[in-house]
Image (tube, rainbow, N blue to C red):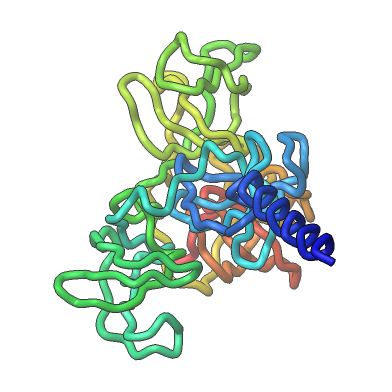
C-alpha cells in the first residue's frame, strides 16, 4: 500500500534535482544592456544568419536563454540572437545617461507609461541614477526627483550618441590595399576583418592611434591615419519629419535605399545623388525615410537637410 506514495516522492525528488541541474537562463529571464556599439540581432545563432535589426549601446534586451557564445533575446517585440560578449549585466551599471536621437530632452514621469504625468525633462548627457531596472521603463532619481524614464533613451555612455558619433571612409594609400579591423587598439590584436577603400565606417570613440568603429555590423578598431572623416560627421538633425537631399561623401553617384536599418538589409533601390527624400524618423546611424511613396531606411551620412 505504501509503494505508490514512495514512487511519487521519488518522482518529486527527481524533478527537483533536475530543476537544480538546469541552466539558470532557462528558469528565469534576465535583462541586459548592449555595450560596444551597434549590435546585430540575427535570426539564428550564427554570424552567417540574416540580420533582423541593429541596436545601439544602451539598448535593453530581455535574455530568454544562453547558447554558448550566443544569447536568445527579445527586444522591442522582436526575438532573435545576439553575441553574449556584447551584453552587460543590468546590475553592473547604476548610472546611465540621457540619449535622445533628436537632441531634445527626455521626460521624467510619475508612472512607467506614456500616460504618466510629466514631472520635468532633462537634456541629453544628464546623469541618471537607476533605482529599479524594468523591461521598458526604469525607476530613476535625477537632481533629487524620483520618477520613471523610458529605458530606450538611457545609455551607459555619457552624452548624446547622435552628437558624438562620426562618419568616415577607409582611405588606404594604395587602391588595392585593405584596412584591418582589429579586436583591440593594437597592431598585434586579432584581425576581425579587412576593408577596401571607400568602405563607410561609424566612429564611436578613440584610443591612441586607433578609432573605435562599427563597420558592416562589426565592432572593433582601425588606425586613424587610414580613415578619412566625412564633412557631415557632426551634423545634428532637426526633428522629424523633414525633407533632405541624397548625397554621397564617398564620391559615388548613387545611394542605397534599404528595407531595414543595417548594411546587411536588402536594397529596395539605388537612388541617384540629388534625389529628394522625406525623413520620417531619425536614428543614431539609420533614418526611416520615404522616397517616391516607398518607405525604407538610409544612413544619416548620405543625405543633407534641405533648408
Assign the N terminus to one quadrant of the image.
bottom right
Mark count: 0
**In the picture provided, is 219 more to the left or to the right than 119?**
right
Residue that appears at 33% across and 51% down: 93
Query: Within the image, what quadrant is residue 197 found in?
Result: top right
Measuring from the top left, give residue 152's x and y in whole percent.
Answer: 46, 64
Measuring from the top left, give residue 109's x and y in whole percent.
Answer: 33, 82
Q: Nearer the viewer, residue 286 or 94?
A: 94
Residue that appears at 25% across and 62% down: 129
Residue that appears at 63% across and 59% down: 74
**In the picture provided, is 179 more to the left or to the right than 295?**
left
Measuring from the top left, give residue 166's x and y in whole percent.
Answer: 42, 42
Q: Nearer the viewer, residue 133 or 26?
A: 26
Measuring from the top left, give residue 20's x and y in whole percent.
Answer: 61, 48
Up the image or down, 173 lies above or below 254; here it is: above
**In the picture provided, is 167 more to the left or to the right than 194?**
left
Query: Within the image, what quadrant is residue 278 found in?
Result: bottom right
Up the image or down, 188 lies above or below 134; here it is: above
Amino acid at each position: 500500500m505504501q509503494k505508490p506514495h514512495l514512487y511519487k516522492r521519488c518522482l518529486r525528488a527527481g524533478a527537483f534535482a533536475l530543476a537544480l541541474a538546469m541552466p539558470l537562463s532557462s528558469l528565469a529571464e534576465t535583462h541586459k544592456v548592449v555595450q560596444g556599439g551597434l549590435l546585430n540581432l540575427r535570426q539564428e545563432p550564427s554570424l552567417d544568419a540574416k540580420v533582423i535589426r541593429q541596436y545601439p549601446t544602451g539598448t535593453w534586451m530581455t535574455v530568454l536563454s544562453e547558447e554558448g557564445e550566443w544569447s536568445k533575446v527579445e527586444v522591442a517585440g522582436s526575438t532573435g540572437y545576439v553575441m553574449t560578449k556584447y551584453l552587460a549585466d543590468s546590475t553592473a551599471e547604476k548610472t546611465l545617461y540621457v540619449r535622445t536621437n533628436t537632441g531634445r530632452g527626455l521626460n521624467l514621469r510619475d508612472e512607467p507609461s506614456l500616460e504618466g504625468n510629466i514631472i520635468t525633462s532633462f537634456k541629453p548627457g544628464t546623469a541618471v541614477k537607476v533605482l529599479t531596472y524594468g523591461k521598458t521603463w526604469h525607476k530613476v532619481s535625477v537632481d533629487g526627483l524620483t520618477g520613471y524614464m523610458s529605458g530606450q533613451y538611457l545609455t551607459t555612455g555619457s552624452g548624446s550618441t547622435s552628437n558624438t558619433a562620426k562618419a568616415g571612409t577607409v582611405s588606404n594609400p594604395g587602391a588595392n590595399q585593405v584596412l584591418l579591423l582589429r579586436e583591440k587598439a593594437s597592431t598585434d590584436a586579432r584581425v576581425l576583418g579587412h576593408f577596401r577603400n571607400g568602405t563607410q565606417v561609424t566612429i564611436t570613440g578613440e584610443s591612441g592611434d586607433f578609432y573605435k568603429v562599427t563597420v558592416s555590423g562589426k565592432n572593433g578598431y582601425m588606425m586613424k591615419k587610414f580613415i578619412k572623416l566625412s564633412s557631415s560627421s557632426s551634423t545634428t538633425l532637426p526633428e522629424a519629419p523633414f525633407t533632405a537631399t541624397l548625397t554621397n561623401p564617398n564620391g559615388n553617384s548613387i545611394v542605397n535605399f534599404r528595407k531595414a536599418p543595417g548594411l546587411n538589409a536588402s536594397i529596395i533601390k539605388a537612388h541617384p545623388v540629388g534625389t529628394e527624400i522625406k525623413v520620417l524618423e531619425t536614428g543614431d546611424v539609420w533614418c526611416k525615410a520615404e522616397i517616391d511613396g516607398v518607405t525604407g531606411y538610409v544612413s544619416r551620412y548620405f543625405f543633407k537637410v534641405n533648408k
